[in-house]
Each structure stands twice: as structure tokens, then as C-alpha cells.
Image (tube, rainbow, N blue to C red):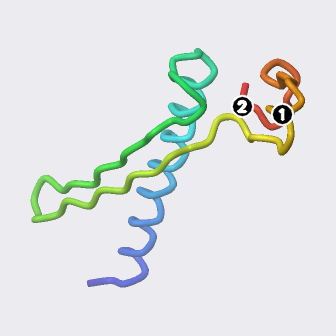
């Protein structure tokens, strides 16, 4: 096996997965299709011709909570620079 060629193929695949996944995540957030302040995501990696199943689950925070905002009765949903648009 050519180690360099293998590494380049893996990197190309992972780059494609990363770029397209980020676009899709940003799209659903931008369209307002997420209920609540957290997007719960799961990525499952499988192979058609090998015994491979790898699952990654993560919570993506959509709105950063500011300390004291709730106690002060402030609403940052429209003006919050940390909110993904």
C-alpha cells in the first residue's frame, strides 16, 4: 500500500465531509429549522465493503448564553453577535 496516496485519499474524503457538513448545518440554522438553542447532530461513518461503523454525536450551541442576561431580563436574540445567522 502506498502510504502517501492513502493519506491523501483519506484527507480528501475528510475535507469533503467537513465542508459539505458545515454547509448543511449552516443551512438548517439559517432557515430556522432548529427547535431550541442547541442543534443535536450525529455523524455515522460506514463503509460499503468493510466492517466499519463509527458514530460521533455532538451538541452545537446556537446561542451563547451571556452571564446575567436572564436576571436582567434582557433579550439578545436579535442583537447577539454570537448568534449564528
**Quadrant of the snapshot with the N terminus:** bottom left
Q: Which residue is mark 2?
A: 84
Q: Secondary structure at mark 1?
A: helix
**Eyeballing the image, is 64 above or below 85?**
below
Horizontally, is 2 left or right of 14 in the view? left
- Tell me which residue sits at (20%, 59%) in the image: 53
Q: Quadrant of the C terminus?
A: top right
Q: Quadrant of residue 29?
A: top right
Relative to residue 42, is residue 66 drawn left or right?
Answer: right
| Earlier-in-chain disc, 2 versus 1 | 1
Measured from the top left, where is residue 47 in percent x and y?
A: 18, 56
Q: How many marks?
A: 2
* Nearer to us in this view, 79 or 10: 79
User: What residue did someone put label 1 on?
Assistant: 71
Q: Confirm or deny contact between disc 2 and disc 1 (CB under 8 A).
A: no
**Within the image, what quadrant is residue 79 found in?**
top right
Q: Is residue 14 above or below residue 10?
A: above
Q: Nearer the viewer, mark 2 or mark 1?
A: 1
Is 5 rendered above or below residue 14?
below
* Viewer-closest of 71 and 54: 71
Q: Position of residue 25 (x, y in %)?
A: 53, 34
Q: Which mark is residue 36?
A: none
Asked whether 64 or 25 is in front, the reply is 64
Q: Identify the element where label 2 is drawn.
A: loop
**Which sits in the foreground, 40 or 6?**
40
User: How many C-alpha atoms fall within 10 Å of the one at disc 1: few (<14), some, or many (≥20)?
Assistant: few
Q: Is residue 17 above or below residue 74?
A: below
Q: Position of residue 10 (x, y in %)?
A: 40, 66
What's the CA distance linking mark 2 and mark 1?
Answer: 23 Å
Q: At 86% across and 40% down in the image, what residue appears?
A: 68
Amino acid at each position: 500500500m502506498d502510504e502517501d496516496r492513502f493519506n491523501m485519499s483519506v484527507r480528501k474524503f475528510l475535507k469533503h465531509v467537513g465542508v459539505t457538513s458545515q454547509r448543511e448545518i449552516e443551512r438548517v440554522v439559517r432557515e430556522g429549522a432548529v427547535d431550541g438553542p442547541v442543534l443535536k447532530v450525529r455523524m455515522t461513518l460506514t463503509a460499503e465493503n468493510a466492517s466499519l461503523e463509527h458514530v460521533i454525536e455532538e451538541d452545537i450551541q446556537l446561542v451563547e448564553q451571556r452571564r446575567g442576561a436572564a436576571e436582567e431580563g434582557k433579550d439578545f436574540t436579535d442583537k447577539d453577535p454570537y448568534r449564528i445567522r
